[in-house]
Amino acid sequence: VDLVTKTFQNDSIRDHSYLYIDNSTGSLFVGARNYLVQLKLEDISDKSALKTEKVVASDENRKLCSFNGKSVEYCQNYIKYIVRVDNSTLYFCGTDANTPSEYQVTINDNKLEISSPQKATACPRDPKDNTTAVYVTSGNPGDVPALYSATILDNGKATISRPQLVKDGKKVSEKLENADPIRWLNEPQFVASFDVGEDVYFFFREIALEYTNFMKKMVSRVARVCKKDLGGSSLLVNKWTTYQKARLNCSLPGSFPFYFDLIQDVQLVNNTFYGLFISSVNGSSGSAICAFTVDSVKDRFADRVYKYRETPNSIWTPLPASKIPDKSEPGKCINDSKSLKDVEENFMMEYPLKDAPVQQQGNKPLVFMDGIQMHVLQVDKERSRQGGSLILYAASNTGEVYKIHSWDNGKKQAISTVFSPLPKSEVIWDM
Ligand SMILES: *[C@@H]1O[C@H](CO)[C@@H](O)[C@H](O)[C@H]1NC(C)=O
Ligand SMILES: *[C@@H]1O[C@H](CO)[C@@H](O)[C@H](O)[C@H]1NC(C)=O
Ligand SMILES: *[C@@H]1O[C@H](CO)[C@@H](O)[C@H](O)[C@H]1NC(C)=O
Ligand SMILES: *[C@@H]1O[C@H](CO)[C@@H](O)[C@H](O)[C@H]1NC(C)=O
Ligand SMILES: *[C@@H]1O[C@H](CO)[C@@H](O)[C@H](O)[C@H]1NC(C)=O
Ligand SMILES: *[C@@H]1O[C@H](CO)[C@@H](O)[C@H](O)[C@H]1NC(C)=O
Ligand SMILES: *[C@@H]1O[C@H](CO)[C@@H](O)[C@H](O)[C@H]1NC(C)=O
Ligand SMILES: *[C@@H]1O[C@H](CO)[C@@H](O)[C@H](O)[C@H]1NC(C)=O
């Protein structure tokens, strides 16, 4: 066995759906149902370092929630994400019995101080909805730090948003979010987000409009927005002017490639996104881990080929270059997006989707596992950065954790350990 394990267990603290490693305080924060827990990273079983705070929905919220026909399970407070704001402050959001709330946590030596709930701008109501958020500290307008989040809103619509930014009492940016058309986002489930250079990237799966001629087909996507975006001045007021998305191609090659269309998780290490995908939620699903270099994602967003259809009944084809407004560079990060011409804003509104997918590195998955549904991915970043082999951990929906080594530029891999940390077969939600 090449794993040393320590355990923290408390039967009243359940549904550990979000884990956050805070290296600067040497802690593991656990977002659970009705609890925020701080554990010592070096030894999570160390009770002397344990801090637990209850974060329950108010009686009023719970009453209203069940009055609205929701189950007792639903009407709890599920923590959906945790981000660090500075050395002594975290933000997290919770579903708060159907009234999503945001909280601020001050980390003291002996206690976690949690603020009273504020109405969340970016948190789902439904505990089952998948949300992602990333706190970006540099590169925003005025260099004001901001939370970028992707979530399903109250009205069932999905959005990627950034709140209003204020510097020295002066507004430097409006709140930005997605425009409404389902071309931008169509029933997505978000899995991860990353701050990379001048962009923020979001990974999700959604129903692909470009294939719905046959049936509802989900595909995996990466979308990006530029941090400097200020929104537009005509059609895209308070909306991103730099939103673009592309399909992710994680597939077994062949004359009929076999696609893994349901992205589950993503990790970023060594300028490469490692994505975990499954092929289907039903029956005999397989899982794959595919690598996408940051450069291949950037190159895709910099190309000038978009997908479009001439009429609602036409098939989707590459957009003729002549339709791109003269002298424009759609999606480019510019200092003043409010100076875009109306035709340029129109273009960004109409054509969010790139024609070609982002292709997997090496034209095949790094790892393919038949008959197993993987759900969470982690990378041993420090050891992988040191070189030699990449060390991945993938957790399944039946409670197994696979330790995988990949070397020789992804050409070779081996599983060294299969580990079952839980007493019974159940989904591992985070790792
Ligand atoms: C579990 O956590 C709760 C809440 O902090 C605490 O009251 C209880 O004593 C803990 N149980 C055990 C067995 O440690
Ligand atoms: C995390 O902290 C450990 C111990 O202080 C340190 O060795 C390591 O380099 C840190 N890792 C990162 C990613 O900062
Ligand atoms: C925050 O922590 C980092 C190391 O994790 C340190 O370099 C920095 O000085 C700290 N900042 C403050 C304000 O304490
Ligand atoms: C959220 O993601 C999990 C894991 O992929 C999935 O089981 C669940 O159905 C998703 N939630 C929704 C509402 O689709
Ligand atoms: C999976 O099974 C569920 C329930 O049997 C069904 O509603 C759904 O349409 C199936 N999905 C696919 C992609 O076959
Ligand atoms: C954009 O803003 C940055 C920082 O304020 C400045 O250095 C740069 O020259 C500006 N670029 C243009 C094209 O105005
Ligand atoms: C996806 O990748 C496979 C393997 O490299 C390739 O055969 C296939 O054509 C690609 N699909 C698309 C839509 O680009
Ligand atoms: C990650 O990048 C570092 C620096 O470029 C390199 O030394 C290392 O071998 C890479 N790791 C892997 C697993 O490729």
Image (spheres, rainbow, N blue to C red):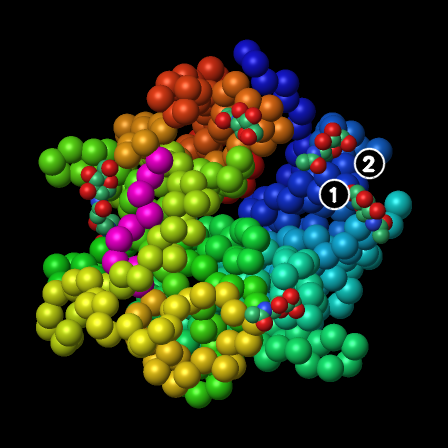
- Residue 62: in sight, yes or no? no
Residue type pointed to by label 1: Gln
Residue 395 locus on image (x, y percent): 46, 32
Residue at which label 1 appears: 38
- Residues 166 and 34: in front is 166
**Horizontal arrangement in the rendering, residue 311 relative to residue 189 (left or right):** left
**Horizontal arrangement in the rendering, residue 177 relative to residue 317 (left or right):** right
Give the residue displayed 73% in from the left and 82% down from the top. 170
**Secondary structure of residue under mark 2:** helix
Say few, some or many: other residues with alpha carbon within 10 Å of mark 2 (under 14 / 14 to 19 / 20 or more). Answer: some
Residue 380 locus on image (x, y percent): 57, 29
| Disc with the residue nearer the chain's start (2 vs 1) | 1
**Secondary structure of residue under mark 1:** strand
Give the residue displayed 79% in from the left and 77% down from the top. 168
Chief SS of the magenta region:
loop
Question: In the picture, which quadrant includes the N terminus?
Answer: top right
Q: Residues under labels 2 and 1: Cα distance? A: 8 Å
Furthest residue in direction top, as rendered: 1
- Residues 335 and 2: in front is 335
Q: Image quadrant of residue 171?
A: bottom right
Q: Which residues are magenta?
A: 353-361
- Residues 405 and 50: in front is 405
Residue type pointed to by label 2: Ala
Residue at which label 2 appears: 49
Vertical order, 115 against 310 (above or below): above
Give the residue displayed 35% in from the left and 35% down from the top. 361
Q: Mark 2 and 1 residues: CB-CB less than 8 Å, in contact?
A: yes
